[in-house]
Image (spheres, grey):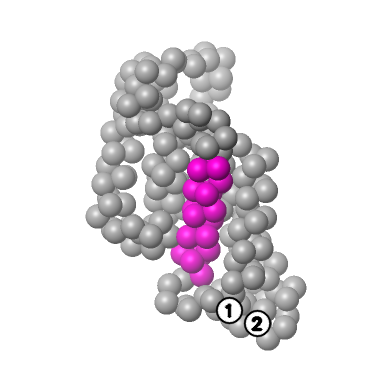
């Protein structure tokens, strides 16, 4: 049953085998959760939003036109839901999200004990969290979820060239953060 394609599972769910939806949940929960944590910067909130996303996707399965892969369609739901949550938080708390210019003025939160763990992937994840939400999402989808620029553009409902620009800017911003806070040695 695990070797079924997404479309076969969706057809099964539409035919009334609602429990088969759990196969899609199990298939996409980790990557979607990772994206949400990077965007929302809060695990509990990411879990809550992830549940909402799976419910939205389930309730909208009849609207899935199969013009793109299910994963791309689902990532669009995840991304848009995260953006909605962020805009709500932004309205509730002034200056919650720093602009790109503000990132250059953030104080260094260098913790020698944490960086001595030599856990490069965790360190990189921490650096990605310093990016604005849309840049963190692009980096996450491209490098960690190995989505193509075309898939990311569909998920984010933007052009492929804009995705490439955001990737370029996020790389430069990451580099600037590393250099400004003397983190370059940690990566090397």
* Label annotation for residue 125: none
Specify the principal SS of the magenta part. helix
Q: In the image, is residue 70 above or below residue 107? A: below
Which x, y percent locates residue 82? 53, 49
Residue plotted at (28% across, 52% down) = 162
Q: Is residue 74 visible?
A: yes
Which portion, as a residue range, is magenta?
70-88
Would you identify the image quadrant in which residue 124 lies?
top left
Element type where label 2 sits in the image = helix
Circle 2 packing at 10 Å, graded few (<14), some (14-19), many (20+), is: some
Residue plotted at (38% across, 60% down) = 157
Circle 1 packing at 10 Å, graded few (<14), some (14-19), many (20+), is: few
User: Which quadrant does the N terminus fall into?
Assistant: bottom right
Element type where label 1 sits in the image = helix
Which x, y percent locates residue 174? 35, 31
Q: Is residue 33 inside the magenta stretch?
A: no
Residue plotted at (53% across, 15% down) = 111
In the foreground, 187 or 173:
173
Q: Which residue is mark 1?
A: 62
Q: Left or right: where does residue 182 sit relative to residue 57?
A: left
Would you identify the image quadrant in which residue 44 lies?
top right
Which x, y percent locates residue 94? 51, 29
Instruction: Please tell me which of labels 2 and 1 falls first in the chain.
Output: 2
Q: Which residue is mark 2?
A: 14
Residue plotted at (28% across, 58% down) = 160
């Amino acid at each position: 049953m695990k070797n079924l394609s997404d479309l076969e599972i969706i057809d099964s769910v539409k035919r009334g085998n609602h429990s088969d939806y759990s196969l899609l949940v199990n298939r996409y929960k980790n990557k979607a959760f990772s994206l949400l944590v990077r965007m929302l910067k809060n695990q509990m909130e990411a879990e809550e939003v992830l549940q909402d996303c799976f419910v939205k996707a389930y309730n909208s399965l009849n609207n899935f036109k199969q013009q793109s892969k299910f994963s791309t369609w689902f990532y669009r739901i995840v991304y848009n839901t995260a953006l909605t949550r962020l805009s709500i938080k932004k309205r509730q708390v002034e200056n919650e999200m720093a602009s790109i210019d503000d990132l250059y003025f953030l104080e260094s939160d260098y913790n020698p004990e944490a960086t001595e763990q030599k856990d490069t992937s965790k360190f990189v994840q921490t650096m990605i969290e310093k990016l604005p939400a849309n840049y963190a999402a692009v980096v996450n989808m491209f490098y960690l979820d190995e989505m193509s620029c075309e898939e990311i553009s569909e998920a984010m409902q933007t052009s492929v060239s804009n995705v490439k620009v955001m990737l370029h800017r996020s790389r430069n911003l990451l580099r600037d953060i590393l250099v400004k806070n003397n983190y370059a040695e940690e990566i090397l």
